[in-house]
Amino acid sequence: GPVRDGDVFREIILDPVLALLPDHDGLVSLSEILSSERDALLAKALAPLEASPFAQRMLDLQDWSETGVIEGAGDLEVFAVQALDKRHRKLMKAGRDFLNLDPQQRHQLRIRGKKMRYASEFLHTLFAENKAKRYLESLMHLVDVLGHMNDIAVAGRVLEERLANEGRANMHHGIGFVEGWHAGRAALLEDQAQSAWADFKRQEKFWK
């Protein structure tokens, strides 16, 4: 998780601003610090993956996928309808009063959207292709926009923490550039999010 967060921060938050101001000392310093921190986190994340218990679990999973049998599985289409209905209801409930949701509530809406997306991608071939395609495209766009908004919100908190603990003026200037650039972007994303949510609410349930 932290490695992924570091990569997102670099690629989505810092790199676009650094591309505009590649010689800014503060931005270059911030980039170097983030790269060093990311490498240290990655080393910690890789250690468990290289241990023998993980390798054995992967082999066990492969054996199960080739030889395992699920008993009493029931009717897949019935299960799909029930599962998709449940996920859709939770998603719509989370998006109720969309215009007044705070960043944390938007984040929860995105999480439910991602769960709905995964379920839809896995089960949509059981139903009409055209309706499923429209639903998925609308849902994916909504999740993507909410994801960008969440990245900016999280980055804002990270930058504020660094600003409070950083005494160098060039770093303060660099962080200010990043915050200002993404403040403008956040306003554009707000309009996109409202449009994406309105479009998604119009989509028919492809499993009905």
Image (cartoon, helix red, strand yellow):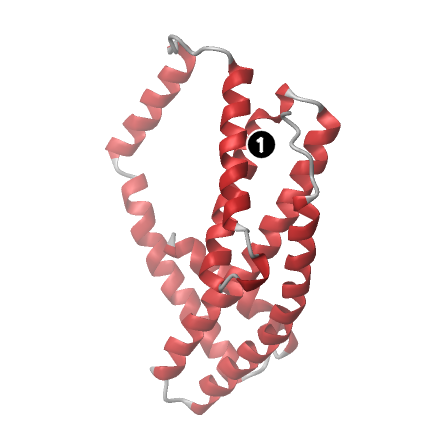
Q: In the depicted view, which residue is nearer to us: 201 or 190?
A: 201
Q: Which residue is farthest right?
A: 130
Residue 172 in the image: x percent, y percent?
46, 86
- Residue at which label 1 appears: 120
Q: Is residue 176 visible from the viewing direction of this image?
A: yes
Q: In the depicted view, which residue is nearer to us: 4 or 22?
A: 4
Q: In the depicted view, which residue is nearer to us: 163 or 152?
A: 152
Residue at point 40% right, 89% down?
A: 168
Judge left or right: residue 58 versus residue 202.
left
Residue 170 in the image: x percent, y percent?
48, 88
Residue at point 68% right, 30% down?
A: 132
* Secondary structure beneath label 1: helix
Residue 99 placement: quadrant: bottom right
Residue 22 in the image: x percent, y percent?
60, 77
Residue 37 placement: quadrant: bottom left
Residue at point 62% right, 19% down?
A: 126
Judge left or right: residue 118 versus residue 205.
left
Amino acid under disc 1: Ser
The vertical placement of 138 against 71, above or below, is below
Q: Which residue is farthest front?
A: 97
